Amino acid sequence: MSEVGVVPVRAVAPGSGEMISVDVDGTVVAVANINGELRAFDDTCTHKECPLSEGRLVGLSVICPCHQSRFDLQTGEPLNGPAEKPIRIRGIRQDGDVLLIDH
Ligand code: FES
């Protein structure tokens, strides 16, 4: 799978619990650094399209800010509804000062 470098590593500080969103070929992708573990996933909730990057991280899951669907950030599957469809988890790796995210 091809990759695109879009995120400077410093943009997602380890342990901050913060997420950022970036554009990857026209799709908004959220990037999180969960205690040093990087995760990239499509930012749009599969329920009513709220931005997951404005939600909350709980362990290796994210809770949607709108109706509290919770998604597993390893599989993308919803752990609880109302969302029923998974989000896409993307490959991400560090290359020097840049994070490379799969298209
Ligand atoms: S938009 Fe995410 S749970 Fe409804």
Image (spheres, grey):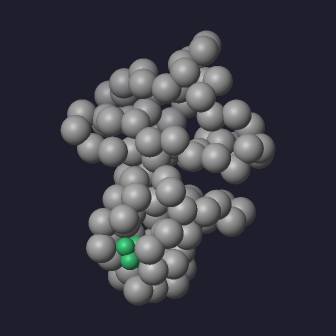
Residue 36 visible in the current orientation: yes
Q: Vertically, is 16 above or below 78?
A: above
In the image, is residue 69 above or below residue 5? below
- Taking the spot 68% from the left edge, 65% from the top edge, the residue there is 58
The image quarter containing residue 10 is top right
Residue lying farthest to the left in this orientation: 26
**How far across and how far down the image is residue 102, in percent?**
38, 35
Quarter of the image with the N terminus is top left
Residue drawn 45% across the image and 80% down it: 67
Q: Which quarter of the figure has residue 24?
A: top left
> Residue 16: x and y, percent?
73, 44
Res. 94 visible in picture? no
- Quarter of the picture holding the C terminus: top left
At 51% across and 36% down in the image, what residue appears? 92
Task: Give 38 or 11, whichever is nearer the viewer.
Answer: 11
- Measured as percent of width and height from the top left, residue 57 is found at 64, 60
Q: Say whether residue 38 is left or right of residue 13.
A: left
Question: Whereabouts is ligand 1, in terms of quadrant?
Answer: bottom left
Instruction: Residue 71: give x, y in percent of width and height.
Output: 51, 69
Closest to the observer, 44 or 79: 44
* Residue in view at x 61 percent, y 13 percent: 96
Q: How many marks?
A: 0
